[in-house]
């Protein structure tokens, strides 16, 4: 995490001290680095130089308007999976013509809105969806461009909950059915079948990127078959999934250049545009979650560092057994002899932890700690469980920083609820 480093005694995001931000906005908060976002985007874009390509950032990874606007200014398109994400992308200034709409369960209302906006295309995941989209587009007198999402039945060798390209997963259309469905799409009104799409999973770190190589090879064969059957293919959408390092310093992350080389070798001669849908790769190591220690509690043979962030703020450790590094914000703490401890939150669940059995400095109450690699699938997966308000998000750019989402307050959470008449104050029991 190049953009997060120690200087003048504290951990900084670019040139801004995380302790200084904490003093102003309180804890916990998410903090993102513009330079890291831009650096990752540019590295991927450069890796694909020479190949006709479009990077459609997967909005689900981090959908803050400021993050989307940063990407949009770099020329990114977006991959969205709901009308909500589509509206976020549009309001951040992304042209509809650069937006791909993916997802296994789009409703007719969502389709109609997206068709009316004139988005770049829909990634279609089933025959019923194909038929529904055809009827929605035809009713509107429009043509929807589609790519079929195929399921290559490839093992992405990642966590079971984020593996999507096996036959038993709910995603995509079996390869064997793709030619028939492309023919069907061609015959239906309101559709223009221009691509094929795959996404085999997330956080793929296999050293040789073999799952991608296998899946791209299958895409190649299918593209050639479909072209042979007269389909006017324009693009291949390779999805996202390239992993990042969560064990900073000890783990070599897969390189965009190697990924691009595989794409070039397997697909480069087909004359088709390559669409990419990276999420985590662009934002994962561009963000941290900063939290403060509330208490340190000595259990029976176990030390618990209780911090003010919890599973509702960052659910990845609980949901995917994910490892996030925990760094002290104060540089001096790093020299202390480490002790084994669990870093846990205040939520009333045993599963509420950020790090288990970790050898870390002996934190004390009031210490600030940074949970690293929290830029992807962090804030977006947060909830208000235990009536804990969503935490602020901060974006840093050089020496500048701004709150890009303020902290919600408890009162506004409570104010979302309504009492039915019979429970209104003053009503007889
Ligand atoms: N395209 C499609 C169709 C996807 O389903 C996804 C992610 C992406 C692109 C972006 O994948 P990425 O490049 O970020 O790996 N919450 C989980 C990850 C879920 C990913 C869902 N789909 C986590 O925290 O690890």
Image (cartoon, rainbow, N blue to C red):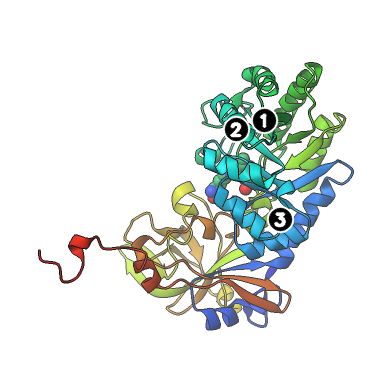
Residue pointed to by mark 1 = 190
Residue pointed to by mark 3 = 94
Of helix, strand and loop, which one carries label 1? Answer: loop
Left or right placement of residue 142 versus residue 376 in this view: right
Of helix, strand and loop, which one carries label 2? Answer: helix
In the rendered structure, find residue 157 and report the number of the disc placed on it: none
Residue 241 visible (yes or no)? no
The answer to whether the residue labelled 1 contacts the one labelled 2, judged by CB atoms less than 8 Å apart, is yes
Q: Position of residue 242 (x, y in %)?
A: 68, 44
As drawn, the residue found furthest toward the left would be 429
Comparing 208 with 263, the one in front is: 263
Left or right placement of residue 356 versus residue 195 in this view: left
Comparing 263 with 181, the one in front is: 181
Asked where in the image residue 116 lies, by quadrant, the reply is top right
Q: Is mark 3 within 8 Å of ligand 1?
A: no
In the rendered structure, find residue 133 and report the number of the disc placed on it: 2
Q: Residues within 10 Å of mark 3 (few under 14, many from 20)?
A: many
Q: Position of residue 100 (x, y in %)?
A: 67, 43
Q: Nearer the viewer, mark 1 or mark 3?
A: 1
Compute the Cα span from label 2 to label 3: 23 Å
Of helix, strand and loop, which one carries label 3? Answer: loop
Q: Residues within 10 Å of mark 2 (few under 14, many from 20)?
A: many
Q: Nearer the viewer, mark 2 or mark 3?
A: 2
Q: Residue at x 85, y 29 (%)?
A: 270
Q: Position of residue 148 (x, y in %)?
A: 66, 29
Q: Is residue 112 above or below residue 423?
A: above
Comparing 46 with 258, the one in front is: 46
Nearer the N terminus, badge 1 or badge 2? Answer: 2
């Amino acid at each position: 995490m190049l953009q997060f480093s120690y200087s003048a005694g504290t951990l900084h995001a670019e040139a801004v001290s995380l302790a200084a931000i904490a003093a102003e906005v309180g804890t916990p908060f998410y903090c993102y680095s513009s330079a890291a976002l831009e650096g990752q985007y540019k590295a991927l874009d450069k890796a694909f130089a020479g190949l006709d390509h479009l990077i459609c950032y997967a909005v689900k990874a981090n959908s803050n308007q400021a993050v989307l606007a940063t990407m949009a200014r770099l020329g990114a398109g977006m991959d969205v999976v709901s009308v909500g994400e589509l509206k976020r992308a549009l309001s951040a200034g992304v042209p509809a013509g650069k937006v791909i709409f993916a997802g296994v369960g789009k409703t007719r209302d969502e389709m109609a809105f997206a068709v009316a906006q004139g988005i770049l295309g829909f990634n279609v995941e089933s025959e019923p969806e194909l038929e529904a989209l055809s009827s929605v587009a035809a009713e509107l007198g429009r043509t929807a461009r589609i790519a079929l999402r195929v399921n290559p039945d490839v093992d992405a060798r990642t966590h079971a909950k984020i593996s999507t390209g096996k036959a038993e997963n709910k995603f995509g259309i079996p390869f064997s059915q793709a030619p028939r469905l492309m023919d069907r799409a061609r015959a239906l009104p309101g559709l223009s079948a221009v691509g094929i799409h795959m996404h085999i999973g997330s956080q793929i770190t296999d050293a040789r990127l073999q799952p991608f190589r296998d899946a791209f090879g299958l895409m190649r064969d299918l593209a050639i078959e479909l072209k042979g059957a007269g389909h006017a293919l324009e693009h291949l959408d390779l999805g996202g999934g390239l992993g990042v390092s969560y064990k900073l310093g000890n783990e070599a992350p897969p390189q965009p250049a190697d990924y691009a080389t595989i794409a070039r070798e397997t697909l480069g001669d087909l004359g088709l545009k390559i669409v990419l849908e990276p999420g985590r790769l662009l934002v994962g190591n561009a963000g941290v979650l900063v939290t403060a220690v509330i208490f340190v509690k000595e259990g029976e043979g176990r030390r618990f560092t209780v911090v003010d962030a919890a599973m509702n703020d960052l659910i990845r450790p609980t949901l995917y057994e994910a490892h996030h590094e925990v760094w002290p914000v104060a540089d001096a703490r790093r020299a202390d002899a480490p002790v084994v401890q669990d870093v846990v939150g205040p939520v009333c669940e045993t599963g509420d932890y950020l790090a288990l059995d970790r050898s870390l400095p002996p934190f004390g109450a009031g210490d600030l700690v940074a949970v690293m690699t929290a830029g992807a699938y962090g804030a977006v997966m947060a909830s208000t469980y235990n009536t804990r308000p969503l935490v602020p998000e901060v974006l840093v750019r050089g020496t500048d920083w701004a709150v890009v989402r303020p902290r919600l307050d408890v009162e506004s959470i409570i104010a979302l609820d309504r009492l039915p008449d019979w429970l209104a104050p003053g009503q007889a029991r």
